[in-house]
């Protein structure tokens, strides 16, 4: 199992959530096992909305459960990449607007910048 990484995908309003993965958009870190502590900062159009440490152990569903679900009806003889979000869920009052720019900086990984369209 590999650790945290960043991938690029534009955020579009009024669409069903769908993540698009493209070749060479995500660097892959070393293998790991167990929960991972991630130091990150999230900014929305220049304003810090989260800064701190989170753990993959805080995700609603454990990584093992996600892997089991992915492989339940699919075969991956050559392996597969499972990409998830940060595990942070903003309050209902937090709504992105067209023109917002979301920047996520993860220590030792890099920065992901997505404009909202």
Image (cartoon, rainbow, N blue to C red):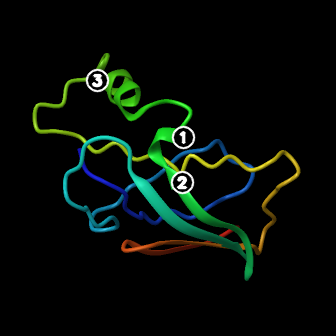
- Whether residue 65 sits left or right of residue 90 in the image: it is left
Q: Earlier in the sequence, mark 3 or mark 1?
A: 1
- Whether residue 104 sits left or right of residue 107 in the image: it is right
Residue extending farthest to the bottom is 46
Q: Position of residue 25 (x, y in %)?
A: 34, 67
Q: Nearer the viewer, mark 3 or mark 2?
A: 2
Secondary-structure class at tag 3:
helix
Crowd rating for badge 1 (residues with CA inside 10 Å; few <14, some 14–19, many 20+): some
| Disc 2 to disc 1, C-alpha distance | 7 Å
Instruction: Judge by depth and name the residue closer to the eye, 107 or 103.
Output: 107
Residue position for label 3: 71
Crowd rating for badge 3 (residues with CA inside 10 Å; few <14, some 14–19, many 20+): few
Q: Is residue 71 above or below residue 14?
A: above
Q: Position of residue 100 (x, y in %)?
A: 75, 73
**Dot label at residue 54:** 2
Q: Nearer the viewer, mark 3 or mark 1?
A: 1
Instruction: Judge by depth and name the residue closer to the eye, 73 or 48.
Output: 48
Q: Quadrant of residue 65?
A: top left
Q: Earlier in the sequence, mark 3 or mark 2?
A: 2
The quarter of the rendered structure image containing the C terminus is bottom right
Q: Are marks 2 and 1 in contact (CB under 8 Å)?
A: yes
Q: Position of residue 31 (x, y in %)?
A: 19, 52
**Which residue shows up at 33% across the image and 22% down it?**
68
Q: Position of residue 58 (x, y in %)?
A: 54, 40
Residue position for label 1: 58
């Amino acid at each position: 199992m590999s650790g945290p990484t960043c991938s690029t995908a534009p955020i579009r309003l009024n669409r069903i959530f769908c993540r698009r993965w493209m070749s060479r958009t995500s660097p892959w870190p070393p293998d790991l096992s167990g929960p991972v502590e991630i130091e990150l900062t999230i900014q929305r159009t220049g304003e810090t909305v989260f800064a701190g440490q989170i753990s993959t152990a805080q995700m609603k569903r454990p990584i093992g459960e996600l892997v089991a679900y992915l492989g339940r009806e699919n075969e991956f003889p050559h392996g597969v990449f499972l990409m998830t979000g940060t595990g942070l869920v903003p309050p209902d009052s937090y709504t992105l607007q067209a023109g917002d720019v979301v920047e996520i900086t993860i220590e030792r990984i890099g920065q992901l910048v997505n404009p909202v369209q």
